[in-house]
Amino acid sequence: MILFKIPRLVEILFSSRTWGFSRSEKVVYLTFDDGPDPQLTPWILDVLQENQLKATFFCVGENVLKYPEIFERIKREGHSVGNHTMNHVKGIKTSLKSYVQNVEEAHHLIQSKLFRPAYGRMTFRQTKSLKKRYKIIMWSWLSNDFNTKISPEKILKKAARQIQHGDIVVLHDNHKTTERIHLILPELIQIVQQKGLEFKRIEE
Ligand SMILES: [Zn+2]
């Protein structure tokens, strides 16, 4: 089964992480994982600028090292940034100590209190340890933009039906989404705006 909307049960089981924001405000939070990417991130920034909206970029430390000028542009244009580990390391396959070290290494470059685990997965001990220093931000609506088995049309249909107040939407500035995100992002923005919702970045 392909999942777009995160079930309430998952939110309860992992309640020390943030899965969404207040349903009482007319706001949706767009987030982009895995960049900066030289092909995708500048294009995404252009689209956000044209639509005058702010988003949140969860960056991978080694990509920040490779593309520092794109990272600077994200911040300069008023978006918020978050830590997405140094090299997209899998928490459940890494010891507590090296995982925390990996995140700290990325912190030197990214300097943000926001953290999102790569693959959305880490152990309870890693969560507990990182919670002392970071706000752990998950998502409530997964676009599946990286999954080539799902057409962009289907993704947009789901978006129209499911996205609601307070949702954290995740997309990827990652080479896996190159062709698809061009079709998805501009339409997705329109769909959300047509629902009378506005976009905001996640604050630290
Ligand atoms: Zn990721």
Image (tube, helix red, strand yellow):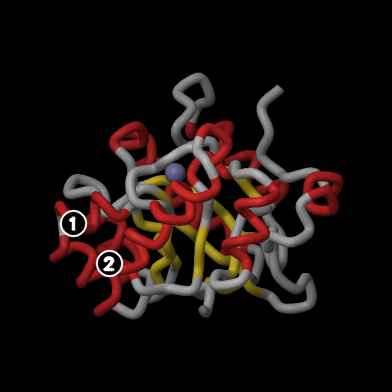
Question: Which corner quadrant of the image does residue 172 belong to?
Answer: top left
The location of residue 3, given as percent across then percent down, is 68, 33
The answer to which of 68 and 142 lies nearer the viewer is 68
Left-right relation of 72 to 141: left
> Label 2 sits on what residue type?
Leu
> Label 1 sits on what residue type?
Leu
Write the residue at 29% across / 36% down: 175
Write the residue at 25% across / 50% down: 62
> Which quarter of the image is occupied by the N terminus?
top right
What's the distance in space between the residues labelled 1 and 2, CA to CA? Answer: 8 Å
Write the residue at 61% across / 55% down: 138
Q: Is mark 2 within 8 Å of ligand 1?
A: no
**Callout 2: SS:** helix
Does any portion of residue 181 appear in the rendered image? yes
Q: Earlier in the sequence, mark 1 or mark 2?
A: 1
Q: Quadrant of ligand 1?
A: top left
Q: Residues within 10 Å of mark 2 (few under 14, many from 20)?
A: some
Q: Is residue 54 above or below residue 15?
A: below
Left-right relation of 200 to 112: right
Q: Which residue is mark 2?
A: 109
Q: Which residue is mark 1?
A: 65
Q: Is residue 24 above or below residue 87?
A: below
Write the residue at 85% across / 53% down: 12
